[in-house]
DNA sequence: TTTGCTAATGTAATCGCTTACAGCGTTGTT
DNA sequence: AACAACGCTGTAAGCGATTACATTAGCAAA
């Protein structure tokens, strides 16, 4: 037998309205009442019904997720972000709708649109502006609300991590193209490395953002005579490839080479690989908050979500 | 502005009850009325709201999705299936809940569980049986409802495709381990190839199910002197790797080598790569249907979803 | 004591749909 | 002619939440 809000109300001796208010964390509930209600909810094992919830709230919040044809929806990173977004919206009883890359002919009513790190951003924003749809970007932009990981900080963190382990010759595998994310990672990394002293050297190479891209980059660098003691990869996917290349070349990790990736996917992709991890659930949380703000016409905001080091056995003291 | 049932009712000059009856195919509606309503619905592009529908039909279904620790939730295939499932449940206003690999301490009420192609299947089923939770498997099993792509048929189709193009020396890159899916693909493929005549030869090699696994397998095969004119990869991920290996080796595709993957992800992963495509939305659809049947205590059913060839420029006539 | 405000709570409309029940012309039976 | 049965349709009460609005209590100021 499913427990409903009115049973909770009855047991707690309050009205359904009050119960609803404590569920949604409205501040106008007296402390004593709130805890009483929470207690009853706990005791009866109450879970609000998401379907009913959505029906009653939805009129305000249906948000579309727009990912361009250019983006790779099958990439591990995208997959993670997507899942986090869905979970976040589920928790807030928001309806989410996947939109097709091409919007002509799109007619379903929406309150806002969430754009995933898009190419052709300008064009897209224009399309949305025409339809007067508030929009929020996961990525970087100006004049629009957006949320992104702290790429510069992550780059710096990567550099400091390697420096503290005594590495003096480091390699950075970055991504071809003009992605702001990867440029920032490279900049943060280079900034710290270059400030570390004259005996520290940095080489940067750029390749395709994929496992194979990382593999080829690392293999070719090594065969071309690059012999760093530490390598920082702009993404975990590339790191997986680079890791594989080093294995194939017989270079031992971490004895002969320390490796560090970026994104926080490494633990699933290649156990043991250290990474600068993004807080993806947090990014999703901020993204949805920004969307709700945008719907209320509040001014756009840029938020940067911190990253942290997720250590692993691919990291070791530099050999002498 | 969202169109509701009452607008349809107004436009058609009937009551909402009647509209609802035609939506649900109740037989007690006069023919003329029915067609009038259908016409208006068509004209206004009306779609019944699944959330409201579910709420009022009070068949509240919450289904858990259980994926083991061993499964790679970031793999492109999994990602696709996941998205398709979510969409399907959204369309049916079913609540889906992601469950942790370890179920001890799990308390949220569920009506059923959907298991993704799991390792340790027996153990898991026992756990679920203890809790009296109906369960459905995406993959293969006995004594339980399950849905899977037609792997054997897909293997045969791959073989016929290559044979029809005149290939006489073919390579199959398969997956290490005891996955039924991949065994079936290999069997279907081998069956047809081996029946094709004495001048047709097949070599099978097995490696890791990943881009890198495919890369290494293909590279090593080639370097070991394997010179087929066509290669069939058990998954598109491996195919991407194998494709890359051939590029690196300077083997031209498709002039010197035809390639065929499996899963239907190739168009996104590696444009141009032909593949035996699964109908993933259909698999998701069947999976959810089976779950609903299981909830109603109907006897378990096994369903096999057909696959089809998605051709591409990686396929060509065999060289003489 | 009365007035005015604020904080906390109750009330009831609402979200979009289903469905039990009631109403009402027709037709068939006696 | 009276009545039952039937076929179709309208009406309104839910489903389980949210929330605008009304109400009440409590307290300070006049």
Image (spheres, coloured by chain):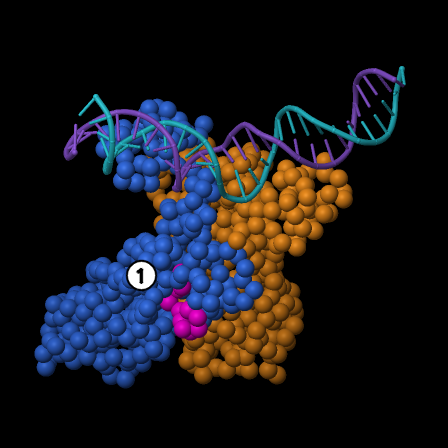
Chain colours: A blue, B orange, C cyan, D purple
Give the chain letter at badge 1: A
Residue A195 position within the rendered picture, expressed as x and y whole percent measured from the top left: 12, 77
Callout 1: 10 Å neighbours few (<14), some, many (20+)? few
Depth check: B213 or A26 in front? A26
Report whether B139 appears left or right of B317.
left
Judge whether residue B207 can be spotted in this image.
no
Judge whether residue A89 can be spotted in this image.
yes
Residue A223 position within the rendered picture, expressed as x and y whole percent measured from the top left: 29, 82
Range of residues picked out in magenta: A114-126
Depth check: A49 or A109 in front? A109
Residue B295 lies, with reference to residue A315, above or below; the image says: above
> Is residue A125 one of those drawn in magenta?
yes
**Disc 1: which residue:** A299
Q: Residue at x 56, y 77 (%)?
A: B313
Residue A224 lies, with reference to residue A218, above or below; the image says: below
Q: Residue at x 31, y 28 (%)?
A: A40
Mark 1 falls on what kind of element?
loop
Report whether B26 appears left or right of B252.
right
Q: For residue A258, which quarter of the picture?
A: bottom left
Q: Residue at x 36, y 58 (%)?
A: A297
Rendered-image quadrant of the C terminus of chain A:
bottom left
Residue A163 position within the rendered picture, expressed as x and y whole percent measured from the top left: 13, 70
């Amino acid at each position: 037998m499913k427990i409903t809000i009115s049973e909770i109300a009855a047991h707690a001796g309050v009205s359904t309205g009050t119960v609803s208010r404590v569920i949604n964390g409205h501040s106008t509930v007296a402390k004593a009442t709130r805890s009483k209600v929470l207690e009853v909810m706990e005791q009866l094992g109450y879970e609000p019904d998401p379907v009913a919830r959505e029906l009653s709230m939805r009129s305000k919040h249906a948000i579309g997720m727009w990912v361009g044809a250019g983006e790779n929806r099958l990439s591990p990173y995208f997959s993670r972000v997507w899942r986090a977004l869905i979970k976040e919206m589920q928790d807030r009883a928001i309806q989410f709708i996947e939109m097709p890359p091409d919007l002509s002919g799109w007619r379903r009513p929406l309150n806002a649109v969430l754009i995933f790190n898009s190419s052709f951003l300008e064009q897209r924003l224009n399309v949305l502006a025409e339809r007067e749809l508030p929009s929020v970007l996961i990525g970087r932009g100006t004049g629009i609300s957006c949320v992104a990981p702290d790429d510069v900080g992550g780059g710096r963190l990567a550099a400091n991590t390697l420096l503290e382990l005594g590495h003096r010759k480091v390699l950075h595998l970055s991504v071809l193209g003009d992605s702001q994310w990867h440029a920032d990672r490279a900049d943060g990394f280079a900034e710290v490395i270059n400030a570390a002293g004259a005996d520290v050297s940095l080489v940067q190479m750029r390749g395709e953002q994929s496992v194979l891209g990382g593999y080829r980059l690392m293999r070719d660098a090594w065969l071309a005579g690059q012999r760093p003691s530490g390598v920082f990869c702009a993404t975990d996917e590339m790191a997986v490839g680079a890791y594989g290349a080093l294995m194939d070349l017989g270079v031992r990790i971490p004895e002969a080479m320390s490796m560090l990736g970026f994104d926080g996917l490494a633990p699933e992709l290649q156990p043991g690989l250290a990474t600068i991890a993004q807080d993806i659930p947090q990014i999703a949380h901020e993204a949805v908050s920004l969307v709700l703000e945008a719907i209320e016409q509040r001014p756009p905001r840029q938020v940067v979500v911190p990253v942290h080091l997720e250590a692993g056995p691919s990291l070791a003291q530099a050999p002498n």
